[in-house]
Image (cartoon, helix red, strand yellow):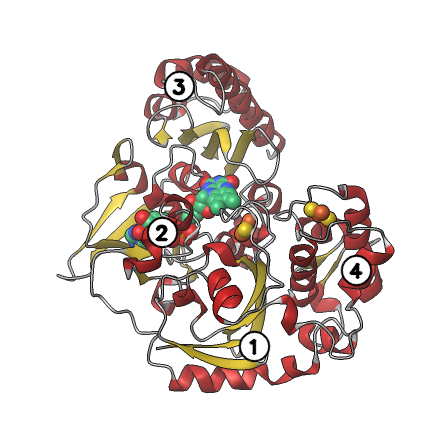
Amino acid sequence: MLRFILNNQTVETDLPSGMTVLDFVRYHKNLKGTKIGCREGDCGACTVLVGELTDGEVGYRSMTSCLMPLANAAGKHIVTIEGINPADGGLTPAQTALVDESGTQCGFCTVGFVMSLTGYSLSGGERSGETALSAIDGNICRCTGYKSIERAAKRICDLQFAICNSTISAAEVAGSQIDQAISTGTVPNYFESIGERLRMLFTEDSNRKLKIENRKWMAGGTDLYVQKHEEMVHAGAVSLFDDPSLRFINETADSVEIGPSVVVTDLLESEVFNRLFPDLYRHLKLVSSTPIRNMATLAGNFVNASPIGDMTAWFIALGARIELRDQFSGDERTIALADLYLGYKTLDRRDSEIISKITFGKDFTHFNFEKVSKRTYLDIASVNTAISLKVSDGMIERALVSMGGVAPTPLLLRKTSEFMTGRPFGHETFAAAELLIQDEIVPISDVRGSAEYKRLLARQLFRAHGLAVSSEQ
Ligand SMILES: Cc1cc2nc3c(=O)[nH]c(=O)nc-3n(C[C@H](O)[C@H](O)[C@H](O)COP(=O)(O)OP(=O)(O)OC[C@H]3O[C@@H](n4cnc5c(N)ncnc54)[C@H](O)[C@@H]3O)c2cc1C
Ligand code: FES
Ligand code: FES
């Protein structure tokens, strides 16, 4: 039995835990405000808000309900448009802004935009015109045109916080996000009681324990539900998404340990990651969209084994190691992430093994990530690459360069990395390494670009690394 709060109602269901939240709300709860567009996480028409207790407070994030299994709703607050519409038939500030700025025509996408903007109003983090626009980076509109929607997004920020002409953190805004949102009519009064109701649900709920009935694992579902939608509904896969023992970011004296179910947004909001990676926001904005970053786990990215997985390229360049734990025997082993990949979608991993920990050393002095895709945002890479360097007294003590989209697997460019190690940190080393890369990669022509184009991208992105790390000196 799965239990969660849907809008203002506690629901219990025995329906398959693999059923999507989208199908549940539309076909079992008759909440038709949430729309079906692509069913692949691309359009945002199905966006809902997901509230979860973290450190005693409820935090809300936007998610695409078409890729979200009911299993991942257990113990949470799921909010559809019906859950925020004012009882008096009026409009919320997000709805008003879209109407006033002529941000809607046919209206099919509008609910998704409203939910994303409402999620923005409820979330923590920096408040600025740029972050308001980021909040709707997962929503597509086919008929209105984006300028009016962008104006509406900026207006929400201005109206609610009067701060979008400057950069200010949410912490500097008086009162909790939820109190603020209630006082501005962004969400109804019942949101006040959700924290307490979730606490009760959590205490009573026994479903959150990891059940090990089979060897099918899922996390955020953003790859699995795109690739095997029908199968997933009845797969009975064990969700690793909410297991607290798999969601942590711990810093030690010389390393960082991360739980495999940490999502990309957790990194964006992590003090440790913002300190270690000054360009974190610029880099991670290139990864999918806000709702997908809210669902996409690191382990999911690694095990999906796409040659162009962004977080895979990122962590290979950090020399990350992964702990694999057999869920049946309890055996554990640790390998380098780069060694997980044996061939196209072939991994050094048994079905019964899950990734239980990711670790990387902090002793790098420079890091950069680059990605080129057909669209700048919400698109997978044609080629991506990351570099980490340990530089001391003008010499490169250790170099690690990763690249994706240039071979059947995500690549650690071993020869290039070895070549750079022990050489002076400067233009000549980068210029010579650039030539070596061309011998190490074997790109093929596909929908993401011709082999020749990918070779050109590999060269240009490596040059971009050179510029980025030399400006960090
Ligand atoms: C619209 C859209 C845009 C996207 N954009 C990008 C992008 O820009 N860049 C990018 O890299 N990816 C992108 N993706 C792909 C996807 O979001 C990521 O790969 C994501 O990190 C997958 O994580 P997940 O938790 O959703 O994985 P799931 O789909 O839940 O699982 C993926 C695989 O990982 C396995 N798995 C999950 N956790 C574990 C574990 N702890 N141990 C062992 N196996 C495990 C599952 O069994 C499954 O085989 C996009 C996807 C969508 C739908
Ligand atoms: S229906 Fe398009 S993102 Fe869900
Ligand atoms: S208003 Fe028609 S798709 Fe956006």
Residue under pointer 4: 156
Q: Is mark 2 within 8 Å of ligand 1?
A: no
- Tell me the amino acid under the disc marked 1: Glu
Q: Which structural element holds mark 2?
A: helix
Q: Give the mark, 2 or 3, whose residue is nearer the N terminus.
A: 2
Give the labeled residue for mark 3: 443
Q: Count of labels shown? A: 4
Q: Tell me if residue 328 comes above or below residue 108 in the rendering.
A: below
* Furthest residue in direction right, as rendered: 100
| Separation (CA) of disc 3 from disc 4 | 45 Å
Mark number, residue 57 = 1
Q: Earlier in the sequence, mark 2 or mark 1?
A: 1
- Report crowding for label 1: few under 14, some 14 to 19, many 20 or more residues within 10 A (C-alpha): some
In the rendered image, residue 160, in percent from the top left (x then y), is placed at: 80, 66
- How far is mark 2 from mark 4, CA to CA? 38 Å
**Which residue is at the front of the view, 432 or 32?**
32
What amino acid type is highlighted by mark number 3?
Answer: Pro
Name the spot of residue 298 as percent of width and height, x first: 41, 50
Q: Is residue 218 above or below residue 463?
A: below
First in sequence: mark 2 vs mark 4: 4
Q: Which mark is residue 230?
A: 2
